[in-house]
Image (cartoon, rainbow, N blue to C red):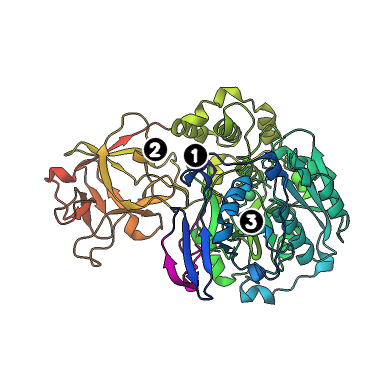
Amino acid sequence: VVTILVYIIKDPRLSFDHDSDVMIPLKSRHRNQEEYIDKRGIHVVVGHYMGDDIPGRTTPNLTQELLNFNGFSPRPGVGENGEAVFIQSFDAARMQQLYHINKFNLLASDRIALNRSLPDVRKKKCLERKYRVETLPTTSVIIVFHNEAWSTLLRTVHSVINRSPRRLLEEIILVDDASQRSFLKEPLEEYVAKLPVSVQVIRSPTRTGLIRARLLGAQEARGAVLTFLDAHCEATTGWLEPLLSRIAEDRTRVVCPIIDIIHEDTFQYVRSFELHWGAFNWNLHFRWYTLGQRELQERRKDITEAYRTPAMAGGLFSIHKDYFYQIGSYDRNMDVWGGENLEMSFRVWMCGGSVEIAPCSHVGHVFRKSSPYTFPGEGGVGGVLYRNLARVALVWLDEWAHFYFKMNQDAARMRDSVTVRDRQMLRDRLACHDFQWYLDNVWPEHFFPTKDGSFGKLRNKYQNKCLQRPMGRTIGSLQPTGPAVLKECVIETYPPQAFVFSKKGYIMTDESVCLDAPDSEATQEPQVRIMACSEYDRQKWSYDDDTLLLKHIKSGLCLDLPSKSNPDTLSLKKCDSYAPTQKWVFEHVEWI
Ligand code: LR7
Ligand code: MN
């Protein structure tokens, strides 16, 4: 369950670093918890409480009373300026108990003011940009939620009210997707009635999922633009103008902010990277990857300019209301969670619009490692998610739908249980481009097989084993990089042993990792590894069908078995067409 729901998440450069506060580290009693005495002499416990990991606490003790308890009690100064909140050891048990409710540190969130201050994380250049507010369209901010915490939901609302020009903020629409918490009923309505901006609460009588909940909200919206946010966000200064001004220039743009990180343990506001865009892997799971070459070039000219992205994360974006309906709103047959972000990204791109990121707009989001709510529907979380993704594939992926189902047994099982006629008709009606066009034009850096590259296994003739990429991409880790190793060939389609040999000479596989070796000048014995695809020459290879040699173009050396001095990874040696260890067979795998 956990891995399915994981999105980016941690770039080591971003991970929360509290070393600077540490005076005396202490040995913690729990695996996922750090304790120390800080500079002020206070005993600090930093929880990384991932619920079930805590020994002796496999079943969270969540009583109805606890779930309905709104413990919100802010303490002056806590978390101001986006700073981290530390919970002291005498509150650790409470923190642990509350963590399970929303899968973030609720106790920390409840101690932070609803209108806390945040740093202005924008690049200096962004401050020089002037927007003519009177010329921008108004927006309705739509926030859907299911059993959200009081403090995170209302901090989202307050941050929007406090940091949006009043003229532009038509209203806020809260859509309650059948929450069961009593404080989200009348108390919420009473609270929002006193706010200086119109805030409506719309209730779905039954659990409908975030996709249909957003449609309910959109239906009531009066603003010219719809701006969607998750229910645990914080908007920073100047967030709205960059989004609306792009849409004012061109209604067919769907614009996302930079999504910063609100740390799930400390609620620290952590600025996120700007050199990434959104895309997806062979499982159709959303990923952040390094920006494409074209966009990197463009950004050198002006770092404040919005840039294109192949896909959006899904939760935070603005879209013109008329365009939202013109382009087919959402697929209302998608349930609960997942897939709608790629569905909308493909649809918008392929049917004439664009999806982009405005780097001067920053909004924080609480990223969690697991989901706190149920996934009603057959098959639980997997069933729901893969039914949604099967719909995406069947409507938008053309030949690659076949590839998708081949690589993903979970999705393949759902294939026959979904009907997508209405969405296919929409695609016809809008006369959209095909997926080939999308790959060529929107995401030329992709690592999917195409008709003019080869796709298959790379078998070493001497050892009779196959190249395999490093495994796993566990929670918080980045792309699966590491040594290039040979493993027993798996007969069936096995994604870790499937490689695309592109026309440009890259040998790449899922998660955008490539066979890589440094230039010969760089080291005595060049190391072959699987690294993030970079489009550098060091990742270019050429294969000779006759000699079966696989040559690293930059060094002029050939791929060989590991050497004695470096037994853990493949090596490059002087090319020798008589050397049996240098013979590679590229075994074609059918993907269409
Ligand atoms: O049944 C549900 N009903 C709901 O109203 C399930 C969820 N929801 C609400 C929920 O309370 C929350 O406000 O929908 C919102 C999104 O749910 P999350 O916060 O559990 O989702 P997420 O942040 O894990 O997931 C990302 O992908 C989702 C795929 O369906 C949605 O597009 C989310 O909006 C999206 N979030 C973001 O894009 C924030 C940045 C994440 C990244 C990368
Ligand atoms: Mn979210």
Residue at (55% x, 36% y) in the render: 397
The amino acid marked with disc number 1 is: Asn
Q: Single out the mark in the foreground, 2 or 3.
A: 3
The amino acid marked with disc number 3 is: Leu
Q: CA distance from mark 3 to mark 1?
A: 35 Å
Report whether residue 312 is seen. Answer: no
Rendering coords of residue 516 (x, y %)? 32, 55
User: Disc 2 marks which residue?
Assistant: 495
Q: CA distance from mark 2 to mark 3?
A: 42 Å
Rendering coords of residue 158 (x, y %)? 77, 61
Q: Is residue 259 depicted above or below 97 in this figure?
A: below
Residue at (79% x, 34% y) in the render: 205
Q: Within the magenta stretch, is there residue 23?
A: yes
Which one is earlier in the sequence, the residue at label 3 or at label 1? 3
* Residue at disc 2, secondary structure: helix
- In the image, which residues are magenta? 8-27
Quick one: which residue is furthest to the left in this view?
A: 578
Which one is earlier in the sequence, the residue at label 2 or at label 1? 1
Badge 3, how many Cα within 10 Å: few under 14, some, many 20+?
A: many
* Residue at disc 3, secondary structure: helix
Report whether 467 appears left or right of 89: left
| Mark carried by residue 107 | 3
Q: Main secondary structure of the magenta part?
A: loop
The amino acid marked with disc number 2 is: Pro
| Dot 2 and dot 3 residues touching (CB under 8 Å) | no
User: Disc 1 marks which residue?
Assistant: 283
| Dot 2 and dot 1 residues touching (CB under 8 Å) | no
